[in-house]
Amino acid sequence: MPYTSTHWGIREIITGKDGEPRLIPYDADPDANDFGLDQLSDAVQSKRVLRPAVRESFLQQGAGATGAGRGEDQFVEVDWDAALDLAASEIARVRGTQGNGAIFGGSYGWSSAGRFHHAQSQVHRFLNSVGGYVAHRNTYSLGAAHVILPRVVMPMGALMNGHTDWDTLAEHCEIFVSFGGVPTKNAQVSAGGVARHRLRGALRRMAERGVRFVNIGPERDNIDPVTSAQWIGVRPNTDTAFMLGLAYVLATEELVDREFLQSHCVGYDQFEKYLLGESDGVAKTPDWAASISGAEAHDIMVLARQLGGSRVMLNMAWALQRAAHGEQPCWMLVTLAAMLGQVGLPGGGFGIGYGAVNSIGSEGKRLPAPTLPQGTNPISDFIPVARIADMLLKPGSTYDYDGEQRVYPDIRLIYWAGGNPFHHHQDINRLRRAWQRPETIIVNECYWTATAQHADIVFPATISLEREDIGYASLEHHMLWMSPATAVLGEARDDYDIFAALAERLGAGEVFTEGRTARAWLEHLYGQSRDRMSEAGQKLPEFSEFCQSPPLHLGGRERKVLLEAFRRDPVAAPLATPSGRIEIFSDAIAALGLDDCPGHPCWLPPAEWPSETGLRPEQLHLLSDQPAHRLHSQLDSGAASQRSKKGGVEQVRLSAADAMRFGLAEGDTAVLSNERGQCLASVHIQDGLMAGTAILSTGAWYAPNQDGLDQSGNPNVLTADVGTSKLAQGSSAQTCLIKIEPYSVSST
Ligand SMILES: Nc1nc2c(c(=O)[nH]1)N[C@H]1C(S)=C(S)[C@@H](COP(=O)(O)OP(=O)(O)OC[C@H]3O[C@@H](n4cnc5c(=O)[nH]c(N)nc54)[C@H](O)[C@@H]3O)O[C@H]1N2
Ligand SMILES: Nc1nc2c(c(=O)[nH]1)N[C@H]1C(S)=C(S)[C@@H](COP(=O)(O)OP(=O)(O)OC[C@H]3O[C@@H](n4cnc5c(=O)[nH]c(N)nc54)[C@H](O)[C@@H]3O)O[C@H]1N2
Ligand SMILES: [Mo]
C-alpha cells in the first residue's frame, strides 16, 4: 500500500472506484483528522499554478517596472526556458550590481512535509550555491521565546525536544495549569508530519490518574472536556499580570521555595522588590492583578494557595508570546515555576506549548534525520523573521535586536519558496506597500496564493502528492517512503528541478546538484541517516526495501523530565545562562537599558491597549488563532476548511454579550476594522469566551475588493506589524484592537 506524509498526518493512497487516487487517514493513527483528504479535488486543484508566469509590465519593461503594481497587474504565461532565463538573469544582475547582500532569501514558511523536497531548504541551498542571501532568524511561532528563554533558562532546541513527557505527567503531576488551554485543534499538526496523534489520549490518561486541570485565558473550551478543567477567564495579553498576582500571594504567604531560589536561581531578591512594590510603589496584589486581567482577586488567591506545596506543571500556549511584550509571559512562567520550586521535578515545572503541536510532550527519542544539507551562506546578514516589511520600507535604518543595534539591508530581489507572507505577516496592507519596493520578486508556488499574485516571476511547483520523498519528523517515531499519488499537473516542476536549472544558468549547477537526480539524493540521504541511526541503535532496512515498506515505527522511547539533571546538581549540570542558573533577574538584559524589556519579568501594558480599566466601548481585542480545520493558509479552498466557514467567509467568534452590544446575530456578516484595514467575517457566538474578545482564525486567502475590504476574513489586514520588544522583535499578532459592525453595502 503506498503512503504519503503531511504535516497533519500520514495518508494512505488508494484507488477509488473511478480509478482515481484517493487519500484516506492512516489506520494506525488513533485520532486522525480530515485535512486535505480532497487535495486532488477540483476545489483545490483549480487554484494550482500550471505554467510559469510573469507579471505583464515586468515582462514588457523589465525589473523595477511599476505598471499597475504588484498584486494588480495581469500575468502572462511564458515557457520554461524563457522564465528560467529571465529569473537567472535577474539574480545575476542584482548579484553584479548590488551583491548577494541585496537578495532576501529568508523565505519563511511551512511548505510541505518530506525531508528532501522541503522548499525552504531547497531555496536556501540554491541561494548559498550562488553566493548567499540575507536570511531570517527565529520564527513567527516563537519569536519572543527564542530570544528570552535562552538568556534566562535554556536554549530553544533543548527545550522543544526536552519537555517532560505525557506519561510522566500522568504519573506525577497533581495540578496542570495552562495559560491558553491545551488546544487539540493545534496538536493536529507537527512540522514534518505526524503518525499518531497523541494529545487527546494523553489528556485522558492524566484525567484518569486524577490530575487537576486549570485553564486560564479568554477562552474556556480550548482544552479537551475530558480534563474537566476549571476555567479562570482573563483578558488577552494580561497573563503576566495574573501570574504576578499569584507570585505575590506565594511571596507574602511563605509559599515560596526559598531554598530552590537560593541554590538554582539568581536575582529573586531584585524581582521580589518589584513584586512587593518596593521598587515602583505598586504591590502586585491579587486585587491589582484582577483589575488588569479581569479575573476575580479571590480566584487568584485561592489558586496560589493550592499551587504552593503541590506538584505543579505550568504551561503556556505559544500565542501568549506572539503579542506585545511577549517575552514577559515566558519569563514570568519560568519565574513562577522556580518560586514554587518545581523545576526539574517529575510532573512539575514549566512547559512552553503543550498542545501547540503534536510533538510537545512526546516520549520519542530524537534520532538523526535525513536532511538536505543547505551549504554555507557567505552573507552573514539576517533579519528577525517578522521584521520583513520594516526592512523593505526602511533600508539603511537602524533597529535593536537581542542586544545589538543592526542596520536593515537594501533589498533589491526577493526569492520565496514554500511560504505565504501574504498569509503570515501582520498588517498586510503595509506589507503590500513594502512589497512594491524591490526590483524583482520571484516565487515558487503550487497555488495562486496572494504571495504568488504579488510576484514578478512565478514558477509552478509540484505538490508532494506528485513526488517521491522521505517522511520523517523528530519526536514522532516514524519514517516512511512517500509515494507519488498522481501525475504532475500542468507544467509544474519540483523546486529541486527549478533550482537545478537556475543554478546551471548561474554556473553553479554542479555545486547545487552534486551530480544527483532527486531519486539519487533520496537514496543518498536515506543511506546517511541509516548509518547514523544505526549508531544510535536504530536499525533501518536497505533503501530498496524501505521504498516498498509501510511506515516504519522507530523505537527509542524515553522518559523525560525537563531540567532534571540541573535540578539534581546545578553545579555539575549548569544551565547555559550567564550565571549557569535560572535568571529571575538578568544583568545582561538590564545592562541593555531597554524600556520595553527591563532586567526582570514585569507587567508592561501593550501600546495598543485600552487602558488599565477596560476597552473603550466601541472596541474589541482581536485574537487570531491557528485555524482548527486547516494548516495556516494551506488548502483553504478544500472541504475541511470550507466547512468551517459560512458562505466561504471565515467566522469571527464573539461572546453573546458582545454580539448583542454590536447588534449582531449568529450568521450575520460583520465588518471588522481599524486604522490598518478591514475585512468581512461571519458572526459565530461562542459560549465561554470573555466579553471584549473576538477571535478570527488565520489563513483565509486575502481577497481585497476595490475599496481594500478583504472579502475572505483574513485577520492580518487588521493586526499590527510591531515587534514584541527591542529585545526579540517577534511578531505581536495577538495585540490588536478592532471595531465591529454589521455589514451593509454602504458600510464600505
Ligand atoms: N495574525 C496571525 N498571523 C500569524 C499567526 C498568528 O497566530 N496570527 N501565526 C504565525 C505562525 S506561528 C506561522 S508558522 C505562520 C505560517 O505561515 P506560512 O508557513 O507561510 O503558511 P502556509 O499557509 O503553511 O504557507 C506555506 C506555503 O507553501 C506552499 N507550498 C506547499 N508545498 C510546497 C512545495 O512543495 N513547494 C513550494 N514552492 N511551495 C509549497 C503552500 O502552497 C503555501 O502557500 O503564520 C503566522 N501568522
Ligand atoms: N489546526 C492547526 N494546528 C496548528 C496550526 C494550524 O495552522 N492549524 N499551526 C501550528 C503552528 S505553526 C503553531 S506556531 C502552533 C501555534 O500554537 P499557539 O500559538 O499556541 O496557537 P493559537 O491557536 O494561536 O493559540 C492557542 C490558544 O491561546 C489562546 N490565547 C490567545 N491569546 C491569549 C492570551 O493572551 N492569554 C491566554 N491565556 N490565552 C490566549 C487562544 O484562546 C487559543 O485557544 O499551532 C500549530 N498547530
Ligand atoms: Mo508557527
Image (tube, grey):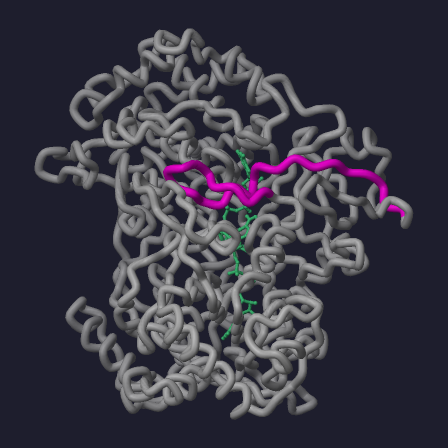
Task: Identify the residue at image location x=55%, y=41%.
Answer: 223
Q: Is residue 415 above or below residue 214?
A: below
Q: Nearer the viewer, residue 290 or 477?
A: 290
Task: Identify the residue at image location x=19%, y=32%.
Answer: 581
Determine if the magenta segment contains residue 618.
no
* Residue 520 picture quarter: bottom left
Q: Is residue 1 visible?
A: no
* Residue 421 picture quarter: bottom right
Q: Nearer the viewer, residue 365 or 122?
A: 122
27 on left or right of 148? right
Q: Is residue 692 above or below residue 12?
A: above
Q: Main secondary structure of the magenta part?
A: loop
Determine if the magenta segment contains residue 734.
yes
Task: Identify the residue at image location x=49%, y=88%.
Answer: 85
Q: Position of residue 542 (x, y in %)?
A: 26, 86
Instruction: Give the mark count.
Output: 0
Q: Residue lying furthest left in this view?
A: 572
Which residue range is magenta in the image?
720-744
Q: Position of residue 270 (x, y in %)?
A: 28, 16
Q: Nearer the viewer, residue 358 or 669?
A: 669
Q: Is residue 282 visible?
A: yes
Q: Position of residue 702 (x, y in %)?
A: 68, 59
Q: Nearer the viewer, residue 358 or 317?
A: 317
85 on left or right of 571? right
Q: Is residue 739 above or below residue 2?
A: above
Q: Is residue 407 above or below residue 282?
A: below
Q: Position of residue 439 (x, y in %)?
A: 53, 69
